[in-house]
Image (spheres, rainbow, N blue to C red):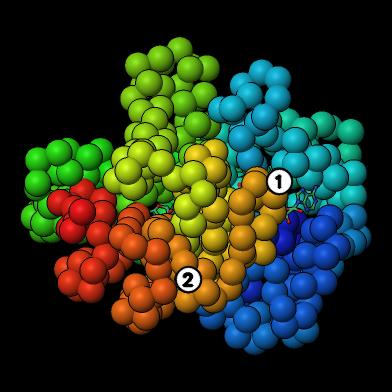
Amino acid sequence: MSRKILCIGAGYVGGPTMAMIAARCPDYQVTVVDINAARIKAWQSDRLPIYEPGLLELVRAARGRNLFFSTDVAAQIAANDIIFVSVNTPTKTYGQGAGKAADLQYWEKTAREILAHAKTDKIVVEKSTLPVRTAYAMARILNTGEKDVHFEVLSNPEFLAEGTAVKDLERPDRVLIGGRDNDRGRQAVQALVDIYAHWVPRERILTTNVWSSELSKLAANALLAQRVSSVNSLSALCEATEADIAEVTRAVGMDSRIGSRFLQASVGFGGSCFQKDILNLVYLCEHYGLPEVAAYWEQVIKINEYQQDRFVRNMIARMFNTLSGKRIAVFGFAFKAHTGDTRESPAIRVCRRLAEERAEVVVTDPQALGNAAHDLEGLPGIVLEPDPYRAAAGAHALAILTEWPEYRTLDFARIHAGMAKPPFLFDGRNLLDHQALYDLGFNVFSIGRAPRSHV
Ligand code: NAD
Ligand code: UGA
């Protein structure tokens, strides 16, 4: 079987995934292509286009040896036999299904590009997250019968989380491969199993039919996001009743049927995929005539929006019903710690609301200020400040929106001394030691816990 792999799409998934395959499979040659020349140039340098702990070391281990980055999509399609497609599949913003369905234009362009330049048989691997039965459309576009070339389409969704991508790729809970149950399908699945088996224990490599594989990806994200929305909905009840969400999640998480992970109350979930994939699921359910199922999953998104809005409403209420002219220091803009990614970050919605209230919003973040500048472009009263102490100087309130561990060890006595009084702290991640901050003189408001307030 061929040992030449191509990945189309050099983003958060394509780059790290292919770097891991190249590093663990020195007997394969791996090339990653993208239409975005600046991105490819960055992958060829030591200033990678994305921040991910451990990624630079991984890329360096294989780059130039059996890992290559290129913009020559056409030539690379012709030269490789296993083609991963890892292009973006955002929520559609126009036409039918706008606001819910997946926008498949990048995916379809890629399929047509593969068809145009392939001269030999190919295994085409869906790495992007796609609606169920997309592989059927992919196979229909590719296998037109006009060319004497066969394309076998597999589904191999990616489950890595940002911030832990390298660790997740190195020791995945499972690798999922969906293929057709016939000779060609089984052969293609085996070719992919052979790649992952270089470092993933065989019992963790699952093979299923294509549709189960496609749906499992949407289902996994929906269930994960549902956990966060469930906990966040309970956090509102905790605040009303003086129950403490940390105590509640500890108690319920010790039930081994529930499990303790992914129960952290927050200002809301963000990231490029949870919302998009649930909306996609909702759209699919509506399409297949299942409105009750659609409404069930849509509620996960509604609670997430409610949680973000509730956070801002609480800030306004606690700060004497006006934020106008007040300086608010926003600590953390990334959608989670250890990434510079800000796609669908709750910080975007919160900052917009604060700007609408005519607050002066000073945003600090160790990795995400570049993206923040883009996300907040044109909003009045926004300042970006890399240094958290300078961001907090003169502020009426701090709002913690990303759980960067370095915020835990800041000198809060120094920060307190430089703030306008009375100083407010809204911890949207329950990251800090609230009692210690209260003792320093802060008025502390968190998620799902009783306020610790002097006012
Ligand atoms: P991304 O936007 O970071 O990267 C996609 C890349 O594809 C871009 O660089 C874009 O220029 C390129 N591209 C688009 N059309 C192209 C074409 N015709 N030819 C060549 N390149 C093209 O997206 P991402 O975050 O890597 O996500 C990719 C897919 O993986 C999505 O479907 C997403 O849902 C899924 N996914 C993402 C994550 C994550 O953590 N980001 C995790 C699992 C799955
Ligand atoms: C998520 C999934 O975890 C991955 O398995 C999946 O591959 C990926 O989506 C994808 O398809 O893109 P990611 O969005 O990178 O990964 O990060 P998560 O760790 O899942 O966090 C998502 C959001 O939920 C973040 O904003 C995070 O802060 C929030 N979250 C997470 C909570 O508020 N509480 C929690 O307990 C866990």
Amino acid type, mark 1: Gly
Label 2 environment density (alpha carbons within 10 Å; few <14, some 14–19, many ≥20): some
Residue at x 39%, y 30% (from the top left corner):
302
Residue highlighted by disc 1: 378
Q: Position of residue 432 (x, y in %)?
A: 28, 68
Q: In this view, does 430 lie above or below 64?
A: above
Quadrant of res 254: bottom left
Image depth: mark 1 or mark 2 in front: 2
Under tag 2, what secondary structure? loop
Label 1 environment density (alpha carbons within 10 Å; few <14, some 14–19, many ≥20): few
Residue at x 30%, y 66% (from the top left corner):
431
Question: Does residue 145 appear left or right of residue 447 in this picture?
Answer: right
Amino acid type, mark 2: Ala
Residue at x 76%, y 68% (from the top left corner):
31
Q: In this view, does 65 lie above or below 214?
A: below
Quadrant of res 2: bottom right
Q: Nearer the viewer, residue 391 or 300?
A: 391
Q: Position of residue 249 (x, y in %)?
A: 16, 53
Marking on residue 401:
none
Q: Pick out the residue farthest to the front.
A: 421
Residue highlighted by disc 2: 393
Q: Position of residue 383 (x, y in %)?
A: 61, 60
Q: Nearer the viewer, residue 258 or 426?
A: 426
Question: Does residue 144 appear left or right of residue 227 in this picture?
Answer: right
Under tag 1, what secondary structure? loop
The N terminus lies in quadrant: bottom right
Task: Tell me if residue 113 can be seen.
Answer: yes
Task: Tell me if residue 405 can be seen.
Answer: no
Q: In this view, does 171 lie above or below 58?
A: above
